[in-house]
Image (cartoon, rainbow, N blue to C red):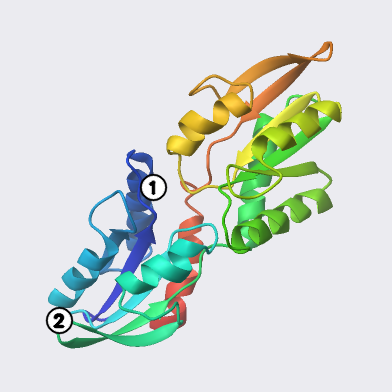
């Protein structure tokens, strides 16, 4: 990389600190791999915003930027909100935009999506949390979206876990079906002795900390509980989201090397 080339990691943002902490750590990991001119911008709730960081980068003399979405899947943020903040009409993979009268070349990358590494991370969480040999059920939970991308990514990783031999279900927090409540009831009725819940989310936030646990028959901030159902005790294990895994920086590095060698 030369001094006119930069990297922008783009996050969702949150009123809680978890998203920022993860983004900062991933930027540190990229720096350790030898990349520089790394900036972080947020779509909402956190600062600095993507628009602010774009102007800062241009003011610092950068005229070529790899834009890396730190998102699980595409959706309205990726297809509508973020492109506008970058001055793009849509999420074209390569464009030239004008920022304060200067032409800037942008490379707009894709979210993590169907990268097999995500399935491997989920599998490792299953191995870590598993307490029973039989009647083990896995629930992958996603945010949900009005667009199909989140559902497609959820099903991709669920299918891979099924191929590995795990009885796997999916549940959405909102907008899609089956929702978390429907899937939990289905797994209880199917006779599961342990249910491991895997959030396919980047970071903890209001949804994962406050909204989801009661729907899993857990208390807020509780990651393991026992729920008595139909005459049996069912272990409920609630995993952490995947965004802090350091190997995600390897995926980001591969994306950067497509443009900067």
Query: In the picture shown, does residue 149 fall above or below 3?
Result: above
Q: Which mark is residue 22?
A: 1
Residue 253 makes an appearance in the image: no
Query: In the picture shown, does residue 130 fall above or below 26?
Result: above
CA–CA distance between discs 1 and 2?
31 Å
Q: Are the two marked residues, 1 and 2, in contact with CB atoms closer than 8 angstroms?
A: no
Instruction: Residue at 51% x, 32% y: name it.
Output: 211
Q: Position of residue 252 (x, y in %)?
A: 46, 65
Looking at the image, residue 140 sits to the left or right of residue 159; the answer is left
* Nearest to N terminus: mark 1 or mark 2: 1
Looking at the image, residue 246 sits to the left or right of residue 135; the answer is left
Frontmost of labels 1 and 2 is 2
Q: Position of residue 33 (x, y in %)?
A: 38, 64
Quadrant in which residue 104 is drawn: bottom left
Residue corresponding to mark 2: 100
Query: In the picture shown, does residue 140 fall above or below 55?
Result: above
For numbered disc 1, what is the local secondary structure? helix
Q: Position of residue 135 (x, y in %)?
A: 85, 29
Q: Position of residue 30 (x, y in %)?
A: 37, 61
Observer-nearest of 149 and 161: 149
Residue 65 makes an appearance in the image: yes
């Amino acid at each position: 990389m030369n001094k006119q080339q930069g990297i922008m990691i783009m996050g969702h943002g949150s009123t809680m600190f978890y998203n920022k902490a993860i983004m900062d750590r991933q930027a540190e990991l990229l720096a350790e791999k030898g990349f520089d001119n790394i900036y972080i911008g947020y779509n909402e709730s956190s600062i600095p915003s993507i628009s602010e960081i774009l102007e800062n980068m241009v003011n610092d003399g950068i005229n070529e930027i790899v834009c890396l979405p730190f998102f699980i899947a595409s959706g309205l943020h990726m297809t509508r909100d973020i492109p506008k903040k970058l001055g793009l009409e849509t999420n074209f993979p390569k464009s030239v935009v004008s920022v304060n009268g200067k032409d800037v070349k942008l490379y707009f990358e894709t979210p993590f999506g169907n990268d097999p590494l995500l399935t491997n991370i989920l599998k490792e969480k299953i191995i870590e949390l598993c307490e029973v040999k039989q009647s083990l059920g896995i629930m992958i939970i996603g945010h949900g979206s009005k667009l199909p991308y989140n559902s497609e990514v959820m099903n991709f990783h669920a299918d891979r876990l099924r191929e590995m031999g795990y009885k796997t279900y999916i549940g959405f927090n909102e907008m899609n079906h089956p929702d978390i409540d429907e899937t939990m009831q289905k797994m209880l009725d199917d006779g599961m002795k342990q249910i491991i819940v895997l959030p396919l989310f980047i970071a903890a936030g209001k949804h994962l900390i406050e909204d989801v646990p009661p729907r899993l028959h857990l208390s807020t901030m509780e990651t393991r509980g026992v729920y008595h159902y139909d005459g049996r005790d069912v272990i409920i294990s609630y995993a952490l989201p995947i965004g802090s895994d350091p190997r995600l920086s390897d995926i980001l590095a591969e994306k950067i090397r497509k443009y900067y060698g």
